[in-house]
Image: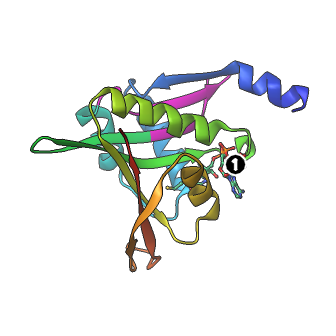
């Protein structure tokens, strides 16, 4: 890895999504990165209802990546859900996405989740490759799942 990349990685700050002012920045980041539009209410939901479960990454104070997570509780069963994850274009390929998802898994495992699930577009090869490298498996095919008409896979990671 070259020195510029090492320097970037050393300066990254991973922290829980805990400031109201992060909401707009996260919304902008997700709008740019994801084809499915999400309203500010969705982002606020991750912030208010699932406090400290979502993560932001900052570089020199600038928001460059985020992962929004929540817990779904049904009876005794606690599932973790990765709602949205994105890394700013110019910071991709440095391992930041994988680190964010790994930290998110551990956060939700710590809250009692026995599995983690998420949906991603069938054509999103980089995301599928990232998740499968962490042990997620393709659980369900979701025909035209997104409002854009794109199909999705639901992926699951079973935690022991
Ligand atoms: C998907 C995304 C979050 C990956 O973030 P990233 O920081 O670039 O990913 P990492 O550098 O941590 O890479 C981790 C793994 O992902 C896979 N990956 C990442 N970019 C890839 C690419 N362009 N092509 C194929 N695989 C890729 C690889 O398996 C990689 O592991 P490796 O480096 O050991 O080969 C990023 O591309 C992104 O923000 N995309 C747009 C938003 C999005 O699609 N989010 C996911 C929706 S659920």
Residue 78 found in image quarter: top left
Residue 20 is one of the magenta-drawn residues: no
Q: How is the image coloured?
A: rainbow
Can you say which quadrant of the picture contains the N terminus? Answer: top right
Q: Badge 1, how many Cα within 10 Å: few under 14, some, many 20+? A: few
Query: Furthest-right residue in view?
Result: 2
Total numbered labels: 1
Quarter where residue 19 is shown? top left
Camera sees residue 111: yes
Relative side of 46 to 67, left or right: left
- Quick check: can you spot residue 53? no
- Residue 151 lies, with reference to residue 49, above or below; the image says below
Residue at 62% from the left image edge and 57% from the top image edge: 129
Would you place residue 117 above or below residue 64 in this image? below
- Coordinates of residue 59 in the picture (x, y in percent): 66, 26
Residue bounds of the magenta highlight = 51-67
Furthest residue to the front? 160
**Rendered location of residue 9, percent (x, y):** 73, 26
Q: Is the shortest distance between ligand 1 and the CB of mark 1 under 8 Å? A: yes
Q: x, y percentage for residue 44?
A: 31, 40
- Main secondary structure type of the part rendered in magenta: strand
Which residue is located at x 35 percent, y 32 percent? 109
**Whole-percent x and y of residue 124?**
58, 65
* Residue that carries the numbered disc 1 in the rendered image: 89
Element type at mark 1 = helix
Who's the residue at 48% across and 53% down the image?
136
On screen, 92 above or below 110? below
Image quadrant where one finds the C terminus: top left
Q: Is residue 132 left or right of residue 118?
A: right
Residue 55 magenta-highlighted: yes
Q: Residue at x 90, y 31 (%)?
A: 2
């Amino acid at each position: 890895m070259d020195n510029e990349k090492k320097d970037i990685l050393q300066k990254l700050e991973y922290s829980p999504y805990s400031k109201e002012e992060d909401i707009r920045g996260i919304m902008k980041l997700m709008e740019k990165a994801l084809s499915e539009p999400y309203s500010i209410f969705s982002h606020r939901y991750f912030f208010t209802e699932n406090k400290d479960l979502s993560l932001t990454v900052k570089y020199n104070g600038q928001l460059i990546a985020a992962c929004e997570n929540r817990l779904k509780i049904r009876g005794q069963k606690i599932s973790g859900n990765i709602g949205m994850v994105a890394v700013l274009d110019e910071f991709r390929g440095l391992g930041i996405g994988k680190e964010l998802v790994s930290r998110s898994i551990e956060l939700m495992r710590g809250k009692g989740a026995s599995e983690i699930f998420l949906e991603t577009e069938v054509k999103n090869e980089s995301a599928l490759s990232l998740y499968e490298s962490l042990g997620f498996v393709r659980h369900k095919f979701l025909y035209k799942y997104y409002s854009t008409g794109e199909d999705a896979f639901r992926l699951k990671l079973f935690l022991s």
